Image: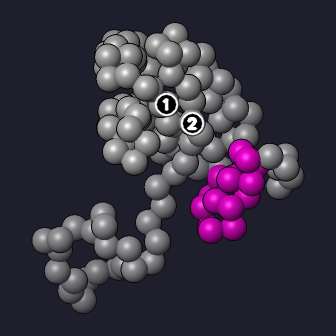
């Protein structure tokens, strides 16, 4: 698979190298950043009331002292589709004095228990 030599291409290449199947839909998190809480909350409300098919979450980043709106969209991680979605969301964020700040995916690593079911007890029937 030939990918452009830019940040998006490098991210997709890293995902493939990590064993992710780039032909299957996955949840991609797009990050929008806002200086002010009011701008971020208004953007959140606008997204919730739009026809966007995805989930949104608003967080305050104490390190940067900025508001982050995370837009999670289940999609096939194709280069052109990501570029298009990122551009669309950047235009949206600019309407509320925000910016797009890239994208990423959550990938559970072997030994990562952060998302594990704490109540689950393994048995002989387990397949993991």
Left or right of 38 on screen, residue 74: right
Whether label 2 touches label 1, CB < 8 Å: yes
Decide which of 61, 21 is in the foreground and name it: 61
Image quadrant holding the C terminus, namely: bottom left
| Residue 88: image location, x then y, percent | 61, 20
Query: Does 55 sit above or below residue 88?
Result: below
- For numbered disc 2, what is the local secondary structure? strand
Q: Which residues make up the magenta segment?
A: 7-22
Q: Quadrant of residue 85?
A: top right
**Mark 2 — residue?**
101
Could you say where residue 80 lies in the image, as x and y percent from the top left?
74, 34
The residue located at (80%, 46%) in the rendering is 6
- Position of residue 98 in the picture relative to residue 11 (left or right): left
Residue 14 is a magenta residue:
yes
| 68 relative to 115, above or below | above
| Location of residue 101 by image quarter | top right
In magenta stretch: residue 72: no
Density class for disc 2 (Cα within 10 Å; few <14, some 14-19, many ≥20) is: some
The main secondary structure of the magenta stretch is: helix
Q: Is residue 55 visible?
A: no
- State the image coordinates of residue 64 (x, y, percent, origin top left): 43, 42
Total of numbered circles in the picture?
A: 2
Q: Residue at x 40, y 34 (%)?
A: 66
Structure colour scheme: one colour
Q: Residue at x 33, y 33 (%)?
A: 58
* In the image, residue 122 above or below residue 27: below
Residue lying farthest bottom? 124
Q: Which residue is mark 1?
A: 32
Residue 122 vs residue 47, the one in the foreground: 47
Outermost residue to the left = 119
């Amino acid at each position: 698979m030939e990918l452009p030599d830019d940040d998006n291409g490098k991210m997709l290449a890293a995902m493939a190298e990590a064993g992710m199947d780039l032909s299957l839909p996955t949840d991609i998190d797009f990050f929008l950043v806002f200086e002010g809480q009011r701008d971020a909350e208004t953007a959140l409300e606008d997204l919730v009331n739009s026809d966007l098919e995805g989930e949104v979450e608003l967080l305050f980043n104490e390190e940067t002292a900025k508001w982050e709106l995370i837009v999670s969209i289940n999609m096939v991680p194709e280069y052109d589709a990501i570029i298009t979605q990122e551009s669309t969301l950047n235009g949206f964020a600019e309407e509320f004095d925000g910016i797009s700040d890239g994208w990423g995916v959550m990938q559970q690593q072997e030994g990562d228990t952060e998302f594990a079911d704490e109540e689950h007890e393994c048995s002989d029937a387990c397949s993991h």
